[in-house]
Image (cartoon, rainbow, N blue to C red):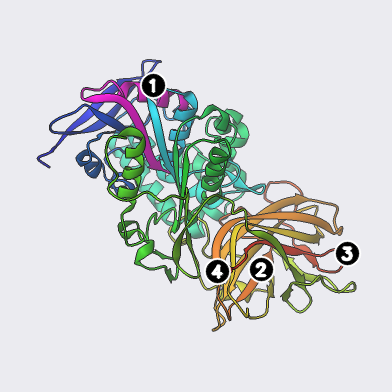
């Protein structure tokens, strides 16, 4: 620590007079230095800040690091309205950071999730000193992973996240009444501890009763529906043309914001901006960890021994050096290709020239009678498969791309307890004669009908090993309204994977009508409220209504 100087609670005044506070880490000697700015609502001294990119390592590289509490959080003043002020405050904070003693006027930003979105918002504001950003594990379209998905509510994420952030709000609100503060915090913690069997089940889901019970703000779906500005203020997908700087996009195959990371990279690359993409076998809660769910992907998947060559911190710093310290040679060689993917199944890193892969071929596999999955369209007279969906007994979330209460860990898990349910249809292919790689966006064209005027359809892709263990890879949901009894084609977006199904393995598709409490239950009543209706569901797979999953299959490399 002798070569690092730390200054706490350094003030920055925003354009409306609100004072935000930051901790500043400086090299003890030399300078001037480029600045790395982190803006967080989760406490600038939280140990998690040090996990993705250690600021001490950055200081020793010759950076001045600024970690700032966002408006209304911890040591910063103002009222916290999540995501609303981040473009203006980000612009002001970049300009302020560039003028700190010892700064050379160049600013980069880094950080995951909310910390990633504030980078995109700052970049859209175009502060002249902002030179590069490295957003990780963050979204593009808020209704595709943050607030909702396919028309359903991201209940598991929104309920848990909102209540967690309420602790700081209650602490600030009752700072002069410690007895009341402690009483409320104990009650809030009890609510969080019982979410799995308590709050998640309360109705109506779109007005999550626990928020009113504890007087904490909703940060999710209901706020988004009632306040369009809350969505616009954090949407990245409509701001690409405002952003003209290098971006390093980091994501995970089991992250709740995976598709946003991929979409953000693809948009920047398509616009000709300098962009890189890194996707590991990671989840949101365990960013950079090599163990996800039931699968150990190997030490080469870990952020601490990335590809057995570097660390995630060093990889980010090497990339930032290119734009903020171009005179300094990188500590590790930068790949010639802009995309680096960890391909699961074979558990290897691979560099690619683009995302999505141009050589991937959309290949349908058809649902067929007897629970089979086949390359040929089904027979003309194949009868539909049916099941009853009861919202009072939904299919429970079991792994996946999730960020929820602790009872629901993310990642790949044995799906046996899901596939034994009567309300889950299962379609399985024959054992593969050769390895089959699927890398890209997976879609389901599902012909289905319901006795209800509105319902949900959930599709999931799994890999079944030679021992018969079925593990989830990705899934998706679509909320529909249709004439009862009418067969309609629906598209279910399953997001993306990079996976090799090994020889002897089988592909499996699950079809059902719920994945709760990740997504809220469709009550089958044609609206919202609390009245539940049991629905009779039908999935069609005949020549006229060929339900199929569409896979981006990557042809094997010709050894010649």
Does residue 175 appear anywhere in the picture?
A: no
Report the residue marked by disc 1: 92
Residue visible at 73% across and 54% down? 491
Say whether residue 406 is left or right of residue 450: left
Where in the figure is residue 115, as x and y percent of width and height? 41, 39
Q: Which of the image's four quarters has the C terminus?
A: bottom right
Distance from Cα at disc 2 to Cα at disc 1? 49 Å
Instruction: Of the two numbered discs 3 and 4 on the same chain, state the one appearing first in sequence.
Output: 4
Other-residue count near label 4 (Cα within 10 Å), few / some / many at <14 / 14–19 / ≥20: many
Residue 368 found in image quarter: bottom right
Left or right side of 194 for 417? right
- Dots 3 and 4: beta carbons under 8 Å? no
Place residue 292 in its image quadrant: bottom left
Secondary structure under badge 2?
strand
Q: Which residue is mark 2?
A: 510
Q: Which residue is mark 3?
A: 544
């Amino acid at each position: 620590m002798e070569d690092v100087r730390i200054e706490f609670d350094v003030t920055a005044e925003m354009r409306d007079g609100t004072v935000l506070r930051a901790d500043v880490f400086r090299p003890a000697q030399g300078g001037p230095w480029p600045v790395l700015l982190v803006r967080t609502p989760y406490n600038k001294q939280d140990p998690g800040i040090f996990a993705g990119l250690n600021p001490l390592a950055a200081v020793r590289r010759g950076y001045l690091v600024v970690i700032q509490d966002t408006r209304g959080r911890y040591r910063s003043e103002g009222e916290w309205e999540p995501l609303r002020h981040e473009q203006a405050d980000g612009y002001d904070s970049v300009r302020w950071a560039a003028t700190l003693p010892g700064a050379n006027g160049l600013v980069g930003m880094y950080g995951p999730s909310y910390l990633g979105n504030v980078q995109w918002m700052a970049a859209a504001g175009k502060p002249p000193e902002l030179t590069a950003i490295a957003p990780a594990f963050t979204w593009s379209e808020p209704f595709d992973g943050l607030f909702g998905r396919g028309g359903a509510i991201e209940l598991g994420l929104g309920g848990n996240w909102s209540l967690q952030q309420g602790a700081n709000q209650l602490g600030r609100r009752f700072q002069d009444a410690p007895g009341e503060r402690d009483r409320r915090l104990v009650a809030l913690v009890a609510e969080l501890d019982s979410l799995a069997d308590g709050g998640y089940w309360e109705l109506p889901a779109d007005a999550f009763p626990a928020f009113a019970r504890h007087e904490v703000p909703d940060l999710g779906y209901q706020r988004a529906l009632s306040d369009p500005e809350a969505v616009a203020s954090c949407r990245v997908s409509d701001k690409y043309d405002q952003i003209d700087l290098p971006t390093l996009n980091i994501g995970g195959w089991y992250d709740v914001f995976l598709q946003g990371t991929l979409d953000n990279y693809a948009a920047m690359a398509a616009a000709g901006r300098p962009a890189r993409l890194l996707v590991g076998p990671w989840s949101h809660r365990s960013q950079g960890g090599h163990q996800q769910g039931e699968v150990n992907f190997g030490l080469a998947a870990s952020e601490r021994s990335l590809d057995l060559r570097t660390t995630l911190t060093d990889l980010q710093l090497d990339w930032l050096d290119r734009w903020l310290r171009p005179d300094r040679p990188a500590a590790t060689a930068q790949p010639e290709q802009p995309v680096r993917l960890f391909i699961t199944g074979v558990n290897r890193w691979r560099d690619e020239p683009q995302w999505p892969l141009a050589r991937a071929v959309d290949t349908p596999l058809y649902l067929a009678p007897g629970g089979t999955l086949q390359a040929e369209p089904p027979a003309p007279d194949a009868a539909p498969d049916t099941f009853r969906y009861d919202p009072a007994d939904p299919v429970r979330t079991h792994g996946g791309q999730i960020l929820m209460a602790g009872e629901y860990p993310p990642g790949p898990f044995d799906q046996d307890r899901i596939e034994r349910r009567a309300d889950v249809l299962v379609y399985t292919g024959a054992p593969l004669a050769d390895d089959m790689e699927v890398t890209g966006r997976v879609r389901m064209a599902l012909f289905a009908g319901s006795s209800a005027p509105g319902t949900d359809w959930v599709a999931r892709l799994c890999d079944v090993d030679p021992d018969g263990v079925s593990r989830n890879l990705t899934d998706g949901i679509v909320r529909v309204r249709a004439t009862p009894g009418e067969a309609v084609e629906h598209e279910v977006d399953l997001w993306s994977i990079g996976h090799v199904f090994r020889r002897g393995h089988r592909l499996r598709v699950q079809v059902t009508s719920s994945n709760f409490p990740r997504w809220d239950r469709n009550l089958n009543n044609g609206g919202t409220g609390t009245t539940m209706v049991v629905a009779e569901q039908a999935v069609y797979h005949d020549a006229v209504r060929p339900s199929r999953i569409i896979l981006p299959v990557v042809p094997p490399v010709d050894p010649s």
